Amino acid sequence: MRLTLPSPVTRHRFSGIDFYLKRDDLIDRDFSGNKARKFLWLLEQEMPGIKRVVSYGSAQSNAMYSLSLLAKMRGWKFHYYVDHIPKYLREHPHGNYLAALQNGMILHEGEALQKTDDANTLFIEEGGRDMRSEYGIAGLARELHEVFGKVPMQIFLPSGTGTTALFLQKHLPWRVLTTPCVGDARYLKQQFFELESDERLHPTILETARKYHFGKLYRDFVKIWIELKKETKVTFDLLYDPKGWLAILENRDIFEGSLCYIHQGGLLGNESMIRRYERKFHEVFKYADK
Ligand SMILES: *Cc1c(COP(=O)(O)O)cnc(C)c1O
């Protein structure tokens, strides 16, 4: 696998806001986005003795897919624990789920998870929330620094576990802003504290007036996603980026200087989201360019 690093930076305008876009979606066809950054250590480090990777989370997760690919490349077994597989997904396998199965993922549904991290087993927390992720995210920070140098910047990216935003802030001189997509601002703050006790090194959290629940479908989300594609010609992710852009637009007076948005990939995961959106908001989606 030859990764495109440093990833490109492109320029766009959306809803009157000029911004740079860090294209981590273009790192590699199969291994891209923030999971490529977070799991870079797994790709690069020699790990003699490791025979298997164990992780857990949702059956549609980008992290699950990325781990399945790494395990396949390195000749490790990949055991993945899910609470349950949605009926539609089980009957019509697609997206991250199908690709991970094709990579040989051994799925454990509804079984008790054992968090063993021993000489033969690498245990990875859900979504790659892990100190070891710092290595690849520091690389992303270095790339941003090389492009923007001394120009005052603001960096924005939407958060799940907050791992990417936190390590970026730790390694960048500029303000990193984010919005929680999983849970609320309090939950995200707790996640930051798990990884960094010095609050001065935490990213700035922006909220939207409306509360959104992770993985649920919202008309606001699909509308802004379609607008983004129309205006920027870039396909964004459907799970995190709509909330990210809503947070930017609702707080637009904060973004006075130059803004760089981090595209964190996730496009294989869009497949499930698009199917779900098509079924729920058929009329919004009918004429959209997907
Ligand atoms: C995993 C993921 C995120 C969230 O990253 P965290 O480091 O957990 O905050 C955001 N966007 C995409 C596309 C992702 O795959």
Image: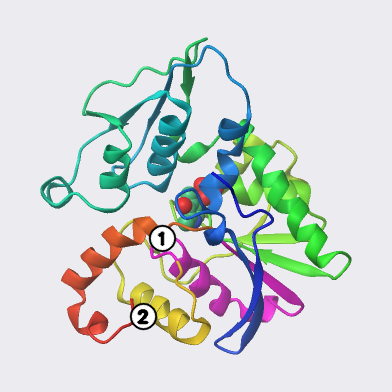
Looking at the figure, which quarter contains the C terminus? bottom left
Q: Name the residue under label 2.
A: 223
Q: Name the residue under label 1.
A: 267
| Identity of the residue furthest to the front in this view | 2
Question: Is label 2 in a helix, a strand or a loop?
Answer: helix
| Identity of the residue furthest to the right in this view | 150
> What's the amino acid at mark 1?
Leu
Q: Residue at x 69, y 56 (%)?
A: 6
> What's the amino acid at mark 2?
Lys
Q: What segment is highlighted magenta in the picture?
A: 237-263
* Mark 1 and mark 2 residues within 8 Å of each other at the beta carbon: no
Looking at the image, is 168 positioned above or below residue 245? above
Q: Which residue is drawn at 30% across and 29% down?
A: 81
Colour convention of the picture? rainbow
Numbered circle sitting on residue 12: none
Nearer to us of marks 1 and 2 is 1
Find residue 65 and report its image quarter: top left
Q: Where is residue 92 in the image (x, y as percent from the top left)?
A: 14, 52
Res. 55 in view: yes
Mark 2, ligand 1, within 8 Å: the answer is: no
Question: Is label 1 in a helix, a strand or a loop?
Answer: helix
Res. 202 in view: no
Q: In this view, does 223 lie to the left or right of 284?
A: right
Q: Position of residue 97 (x, y in %)?
A: 28, 45
Looking at the figure, which quarter contains the N terminus? top right
Tell me if residue 180 is in the magenta stretch: no
Residue 95 vs residue 262, the one in the foreground? 95
Q: How far apart are marks 1 and 2 (CA)?
A: 17 Å
Disc 2 residue crowd, few under 14, some 14–19, many 20+, Cα 10 Å: some
Tell me if residue 247 is in the magenta stretch: yes
Q: Which residue is drawn at 59% across and 46% down?
A: 37
